[in-house]
Image: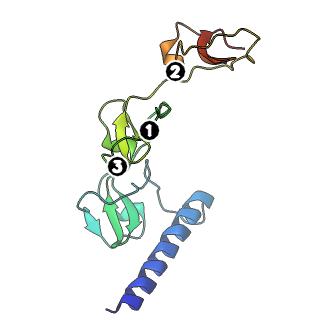
Amino acid sequence: MKVGETYFLLVILCALGTWLDLAAATGLNSTVVKPGHCPRKLQVAPSKRACVCDEDCPGDDKCCVFACGAVCVPPAFTKPGVCPRRQRGAGMCAEFCSDDSDCPKDEKCCSNGCGHECTAPYTVKPGRCARPKGTHMCAEFCYHDGECPEEQKCCRTTCGHACSEPC
């Protein structure tokens, strides 16, 4: 197969995958959509090749389109929590994970400024922070809600962050 033919076939497969996603989302077809989503990268050996929909795949595997075509792979899941803000500079320029599913326990796959790595997420508590008042606290007493007691949130001050009661 020539390079042009391979490219054309990949474009057709991607269009088919997009159409299948659209059809599943709008209820145009009767296929069952399994939980989870397709991983960003193919990092495992597919359980089956040449699928058209999730029903074609064994167990919990999903039918996902990659450069090699449509294959059955384990689904990826997004874990709760939020990736922490990047500290100054960049981390290692390596991809240690591609989805939250690649990370142990509650860790999420977060950007380190150059690559991605498994990182403990921080908690976002309900409520909103009030506008900073004229208090000049120029220090970082917290970085995220999970560091604050009880219902308090980590809120911006005029010059830093501190735990305070939400609105």
Label 1 – label 3 distance at C-alpha = 12 Å
Name the foreground residue: 126 vs 146.
146
Q: Residue at x 28, y 57 (%)?
A: 43
Q: Which residue is mark 3?
A: 93
| C-alpha span from label 1 to label 2 | 17 Å
**SS of the residue under disc 1:** loop
Residue 125 placement, left or right of 62: right
Rendered view: 115 above or below 8: above
Q: Say few, some or many: other residues with alpha carbon within 10 Å of mark 3 (under 14 / 14 to 19 / 20 or more).
A: few
Question: Where is 48 relative to 138, above or below?
Answer: below
- Label 3 element class: loop
The residue that disc 2 covers is 143
Residue under label 1, please give it: 89
Quadrant, the N terminus: bottom left
Q: Quadrant of residue 118?
A: top left
User: Are the residues tagged 3 and 2 within 8 Å (C-beta)?
Assistant: no
Instruction: Please provide percent x and percent y for residue 128.
Output: 69, 20
